[in-house]
């Protein structure tokens, strides 16, 4: 039998601590909004758009050129980012410029980038193998070895 490092060997609940932490947890509607924001930030194209806008205001045409994407693709992603209040538009005649909605977005971006650079890339294959999943590089009939 394998012993997991992720769970307690003995079930012993500190009710006072559980009550204190439950009372301090973030409200469910805020948790949902936070999860939705992270979901939107989970797309590499949207992250690239935020990265480009971190250098200053850009119109859709310039963003498309910087990212080597179609204006249609950039506009679609900007609509999603705008809906989550991550970017803000400004119209100047027939041209729409975009900027980051506020500095919170850059703080999230910088802290997450720092975390990724410090930790190095996660080993997805190792994580999958630890759950007994087949690695994408292996034939589908192959079974992963159980963790030791």
Image (cartoon, rainbow, N blue to C red):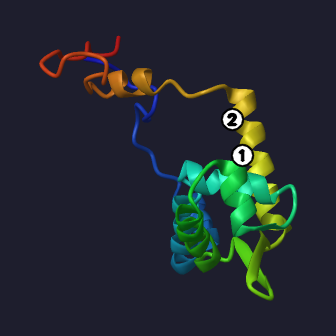
Label 2 element class: helix
Label 1 element class: helix
Task: Name the residue nearer the viewer: 53 or 105.
Answer: 53
Local packing at callout 2 (Cα closer than 10 Å; few below 14, some 14-19, many 20+) is few
Residue that carries the numbered disc 1 in the rendered image: 112
Residue that carries the numbered disc 2 in the rendered image: 116
* Residue 138 in the figure: left or right of residue 46: left
Q: Position of residue 107 (x, y in %)?
A: 82, 57
Instruction: Tell me which residue sits at (39%, 25%) in the image.
Output: 4
Q: Position of residue 59 (x, y in %)?
A: 76, 69
Residue furthest front in the image: 94
Q: Position of residue 38 (x, y in %)?
A: 57, 60
Instruction: Tell me which residue sits at (78%, 47%) in the image.
Output: 111
Task: Name the residue nearer the viewer: 95 or 97.
Answer: 95
The image quadrant where one finds the N terminus is: top left
The image quadrant where one finds the C terminus is: top left
Above/below status of 72 relative to 128: below
Question: Where residue 4 is drawn, which disc sits there?
Answer: none
Local packing at callout 1 (Cα closer than 10 Å; few below 14, some 14-19, many 20+) is few
Instruction: Tell me which residue sits at (34%, 21%) in the image.
Output: 129
Above/below status of 11 relative to 130: below
Above/below status of 92 relative to 48: below
Q: CA distance from mark 2 to mark 1?
A: 6 Å
Residue 46 visible in the displayed image: yes
Task: Name the residue nearer the viewer: 29 or 111.
Answer: 111
Residue 140, located in which quarter of the rendered image?
top left
* Residue 88 in the figure: left or right of residue 141: right
Q: Position of residue 92 (x, y in %)?
A: 82, 85
Residue 26, located in which quarter of the rendered image?
bottom right
């Amino acid at each position: 039998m394998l012993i997991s490092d992720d769970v307690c060997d003995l079930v012993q609940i500190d009710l006072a601590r559980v009550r204190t932490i439950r009372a301090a947890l973030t409200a469910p509607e805020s948790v949902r909004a936070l999860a939705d924001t992270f979901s939107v930030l989970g797309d590499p194209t949207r992250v690239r758009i935020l990265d480009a806008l971190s250098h200053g205001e850009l119109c859709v045409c310039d963003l498309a050129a910087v990212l080597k994407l179609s204006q249609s693709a950039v506009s679609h992603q900007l609509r999603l980012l705008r809906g989550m209040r991550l970017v803000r538009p400004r119209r100047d005649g027939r041209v729409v410029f975009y900027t980051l909605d506020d500095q919170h977005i850059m703080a999230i971006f910088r802290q997450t980038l720092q975390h990724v650079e410090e930790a190095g890339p996660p080993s997805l294959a190792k994580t999958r193998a630890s759950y007994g999943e087949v690695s994408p590089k292996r034939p589908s009939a192959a079974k992963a070895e159980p963790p030791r």
